[in-house]
Image: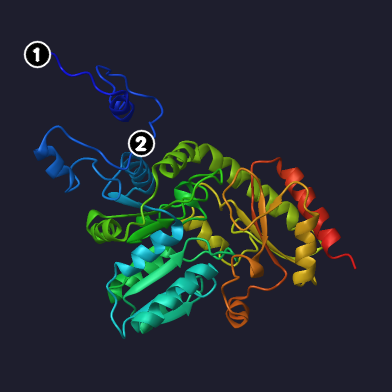
Amino acid sequence: MSQKRLSPRTVAVHAGSRLEGSTSQPLVPAIHMSTVGWFDSSEELDGALDGKDYVYSRISAQNTTLLEESVAALEGAEACVSYASGMAALRAVLEAQNLKPGDSIVMPADGYGVSRLLFKTLCARTGVELHPVVLSEPTAPERILELRPKFVLAESITNPLLSVPDLRALAKACRQVGAALAVDATFPSPYGQRALSLGADYAVQSATKWINGHSDALAGTVSGSHERLAPLRSMRLMAGDVLGPFEAWLTQRGLRTLHVRMKAHFENAAQVARRLAESPLLERVLYPGLPSHPQHAIAREVLEGGFGPMVAFEIKGAGRPEGYRFLEALKVARPGPSLGDVCTLVMHAASASARRMTPEERAAAGIRESLIRVSVGLEDPDDIVEDLLSAVAQGVKR
């Protein structure tokens, strides 16, 4: 008996869903857009629902798996869990600590403003005590020993002041009090620092930035041991804050050129910082590679391959109006609140990265209205410097 010919409506639904007979391996990974997989065997389907194969993309998905394997390899980690953004990754790490009322955590007083707002909000809801500490200060390890926190968040290079903590010393203090240490290592990327090798328990990346490198996808990753990441993976299954397949694919595409790009970004940033440091229009230039940087010696020990792709400076005598005029005068660089693109991105720190901090918090951290943060791109460094200094001169004109 011949098989009944299927309706065109049925063919339209099912045709082209399998590549029969091919053993070709694509050089570039495919984008697996389907959220659902199916199996001829019910036994295989049952196993897939426990994560043994790909059946539903909230459980696991091909493109996110490939990205996680790549990031874990770069971080020198046993495993990696990806998220829809860097902030989702950071929240997942905090929530995985199972903190109770009366527990305490430590985070950078001079770090990213949205991270601080997130921690303030979650701690207020749960009765956990939050202690902002300038972790680049030599006394920071002693402060951790005094506070005896359950969890510590550090930033490899702080946003936006570019301070550099001694992660080895912080990790030692954390081990002494039994605290888990997470490091937001976004600024140097895995090219510039492997935070896990310095004693961190978690390496967190806003992969939106340097790992992606092209400002076309949001993504976040957490790398660490299988034991540390198991609760994160379980919670992601329930919370659903998964990374989409196209975003994962775009991020992995950027990751493939990370080392080539970052070498150029690091070299450009060093040249830009040296040139800016000579300008009489600037109060100070912040770059870990400059001998004048407060943590220059520590940066030489904890940063690999250079001193990072970020530069910050303060415009002499400037307030917010002058800072805004500076942004409007830029011709080559682009005023934007992110970083990590091939294009140089510039922002007024107090109104962007530190926007969610109170004026009192910004003052305590030393984030002044004259502070400008620069994500140094791949343009000619002389063109970048000339553009920045020309815009500074126009910004301070009365």
Q: Residue 227's image quarter?
A: bottom left
* The one of 214 and 144 positioned closer to us in this rendering: 214
Residue 145 seen from this side: no
Label 2: few (<14), some or many (≥20) within 10 Å?
Answer: some
In this rendering, position of residue 181 left or right of residue 131: left
Q: Residue shown at 35%/63% (left/top)?
A: 92
Q: Could you tell me the amino acid type at mark 1?
A: Met
x then y, percent, for residue 321: 78, 70
Vertical relation: 345 (above or below) 23: below
x then y, percent, for residue 123: 39, 79
Question: Number of labelled discs?
Answer: 2
Q: Nearer the viewer, mark 2 or mark 1?
A: 1
The reply to whether callout 2 and callout 1 are in contact (CB within 8 Å) is: no
Task: Give me the disc on residue 1.
Answer: 1
**Quarter of the figure that contains the N terminus:** top left
Q: Residue shown at 37%/38% (left/top)?
A: 33
In this rendering, position of residue 279 left or right of residue 94: right
In this rendering, position of residue 96 left or right of residue 137: left
For disc 2, the marked residue is 32
